[in-house]
Image (spheres, rainbow, N blue to C red):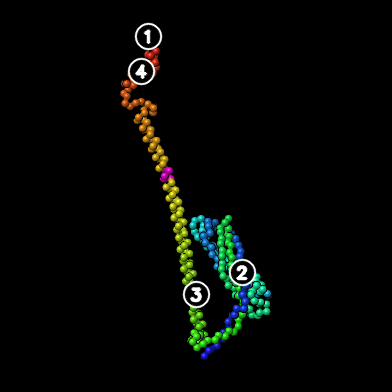
Amino acid sequence: MEQAFSIWSPVITAQLNTPRRLGDERSYAAERLFRMLEDLKIKVKQSEVIPQGQAVEVRVKIDILCLLEDPAGRMHLVKKEETLRERVAYTEFDRSLEREEGIGFVINVKDISFDGELKGGEIRVRFLVEYTLIATREQVVRLWTGEQSEVNQESLSQLFERLEAEVSRLAEENQELHRKVFFYQRDISSLKRGISKLEKRNSSLLKDISLYQRETESLRQNLQEKESHIYRLKHYPRVAGFPDRESSPGEQESEPSLGSRIKRLFLNNLI
């Protein structure tokens, strides 16, 4: 035997023909000197739809999270909040809403794309939010169930309890996921700081190695010059400006000078 359950539930009456996009570009002056924009995140903080005559105003509040690195390698989180607004006419829905009463609107953010850069002491952020709107109306909905159906086996209150338990479980999982993301981001920041320190240390070591190589090359050149000088003194003493070590002082004194030899040659020719 079938049973009927009546519940008060929102029912979709219309929706936008095509998704809409909210895009913008913002610039923020950096409060201090930063070296680079390490990471950028944009999250939807709140969204609402406000009826205004024959149209609605869409308001989307977003948080812009910028992870910046200063010249010392330290990370800083800069947070900015923005509110995006757009007016959407009833004529853009797939059904006419002009005569509808008790209509509510739900915004569904489908995608957020963004990018940014640090340039000239400014944080420049570009973003695009894609969303769609659904028009709903509260009304009584009757559900029919058979004897073998799952609804017939459980009361409506039990179904609500199960739904609340599932929502609670998902909330706990979401909280745990946020906690893991937080620790992951913290570990990434710590790892980047460690890499930055290693890069600085490696740069210092490269400078020391370069200085050591230059000093080694200078010493090698000096040593070659000294060895060459010693070789010339040993094998070519007259060229180097020193007397021959193998000749005795007596022999050097008895050897006629060049002038005496020329004079003797001249006298011999006369005779």
Dividing the picture into quadrants, the one containing residue 99 is bottom right
- 99 vs 129: above or below: below
Most common SS among magenta residues: helix
Say left or right for 49 vs 206. Answer: right
Compare residues 21 and 244 and report the one nearer the observer.
21
Cα distance, mark 1 to mark 2? 130 Å
Q: Position of residue 260 (x, y in %)?
A: 38, 16
User: Which residue is found at the position 59% from the left and 68% from the top?
Assistant: 130
Q: Amino acid at mark 4?
A: Pro
Compare residues 154 and 182 and report the one nearer the observer.
154
Cα distance, mark 4 to mark 2? 115 Å
* Residue numbers of the magenta segment: 211-215
Q: Element at badge 3?
A: helix
Cα distance, mark 4 to mark 3? 117 Å
Q: Residues within 10 Å of mark 3 (few under 14, many from 20)?
A: few
Q: Element at badge 4?
A: loop
Question: Sequence-wise, which precedes: disc 1 or disc 3?
Answer: 3
Queried whether the magenta region covers residue 213, the answer comes back as yes
Q: Which residue is mark 2?
A: 20
Question: Sequence-wise, which precedes: disc 4 or disc 2?
Answer: 2
Say left or right for 13 vs 260. Answer: right
Q: Which residue is mark 4?
A: 256
